[in-house]
Amino acid sequence: MLSGMSDTPVKQQNTAAYYMQAVISFGIALAAVAVGVYQLDASAWVRAFLAVSVLYLTTSAFTLAKVVRDRQEAGRIVSRVDQARLEKLLAEHDPFQKL
């Protein structure tokens, strides 16, 4: 194995406080938009359209975040496979072997 490289991958874990902050922030933002749409001086159809648009934007943001996370995880797996192949080649290589 190469020096300085570890067998175990580094896994970053979010704290409970960070998770709660993200959830509360999302809830406050969604509530603020809902109140803003409700208080808007427009017809019910316009407010309904804006409310549906906000919900669509929210679900699209969640989907985008999931796709980005999945792509990063796939890249991490490919990187680990490539690293294992390189370590195998280096372990099998004998620089003093006669050709």
Image (cartoon, rainbow, N blue to C red):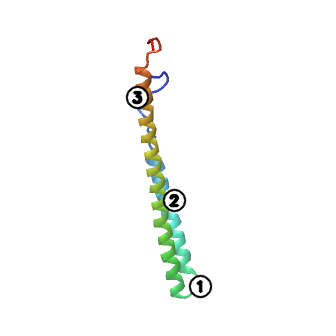
Q: Is residue 48 above or below residue 67?
A: below
Q: Nearer the viewer, residue 10 or 73?
A: 73
Circle 1 residues within 10 Å: few <14, some 14–19, many ≥20: few
Q: Secondary structure at mark 2?
A: helix
The numbered dot on residue 49 is: none
Q: Amino acid at mark 2?
A: Ser
- Name the residue located 48 percent from the left edge and 49 percent from the top edge: 18
**Residue 15 seen in this snapshot:** no
Count every numbered label the image shows and give the total. 3
Residue, disc 2: 25
Image position of 87 with respect to 64: above or below: above
Q: Position of residue 12 (x, y in %)?
A: 46, 40
Q: Residues within 10 Å of mark 3 (few under 14, many from 20)?
A: few
Which image quarter: residue 77? top left
Sequence-wise, the earlier of marks 1 and 2 is 2
Quarter of the C terminus within the rendering? top left
- The amino acid pointed to by label 1 is Asp
- Residue drawn at x 46%, y 57% is 23
Residue 7 numbered tag: 3
Closest to the observer: 82 or 67? 82
Residue 50: x, y in percent?
A: 53, 78
Label 1 with label 3: CB-CB less than 8 Å: no
The CA span between labels 3 and 2 is 37 Å
Q: Where is mark 1, residue-wise?
A: 41
